[in-house]
């Protein structure tokens, strides 16, 4: 009789960090992201909505005028 093997995976952390205190909600990251990883919250601040789609291309953190986005090592 074959045993069922289940693998447990840790959820992958968000690939970028957004420092909301530094962010002025300009929307540049939301518009420039080629994978559309970001959505905005009700106040207009970016949030990582589709972190698994992020390729860490660096467009968001390079173009952020407030330096409010940094990369996490994944």
Image: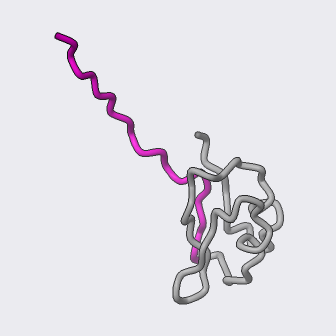
Query: In the rendered view, does 4 fall on the left or right side of 65?
Result: left
Residue 49 lies, with reference to residue 16, above or below; the image says below
The span picked out in magenta is 1-21
| Magenta-drawn stretch contains 67 | no
Residue closest to the far left? 1
Q: Residue at x 58, y 77 (%)?
A: 21
Image quarter for residue 7?
top left
Image quarter for residue 36?
bottom right
Magenta portion: prevailing SS class: loop
Q: Position of residue 14 (x, y in %)?
A: 53, 54
Rendering colour mode: one colour
Query: In the rendered view, does 62 fall on the left or right side of 73?
Result: right
Residue closest to the far bottom? 43
Query: In the rendered view, does 50 fall on the left or right side of 25?
Result: left
Q: Position of residue 62 (x, y in %)?
A: 81, 60
Residue 9 lies, with reference to residue 23, above or below; the image says above
Q: Work out which quarter of the rendered image holds the N terminus and state it.
A: top left
Image label count: 0
Q: Residue at x 41, y 45 (%)?
A: 11
Identify which residue, 39 or 1, lies in the foreground: 1
Residue 50 lies, with reference to residue 30, above or below; the image says above
Q: Residue at x 22, y 13 (%)?
A: 2
């Amino acid at each position: 009789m074959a045993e069922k093997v289940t693998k447990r995976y840790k959820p992958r952390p968000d690939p970028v960090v957004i420092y909301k205190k530094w962010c002025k909600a300009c929307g540049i990251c939301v518009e420039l992201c080629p994978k559309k990883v970001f959505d905005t919250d009700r106040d207009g601040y970016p949030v990582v909505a589709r972190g698994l789609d992020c390729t860490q291309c660096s467009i968001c953190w390079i173009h952020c005028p407030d330096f409010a986005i940094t990369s996490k090592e994944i």
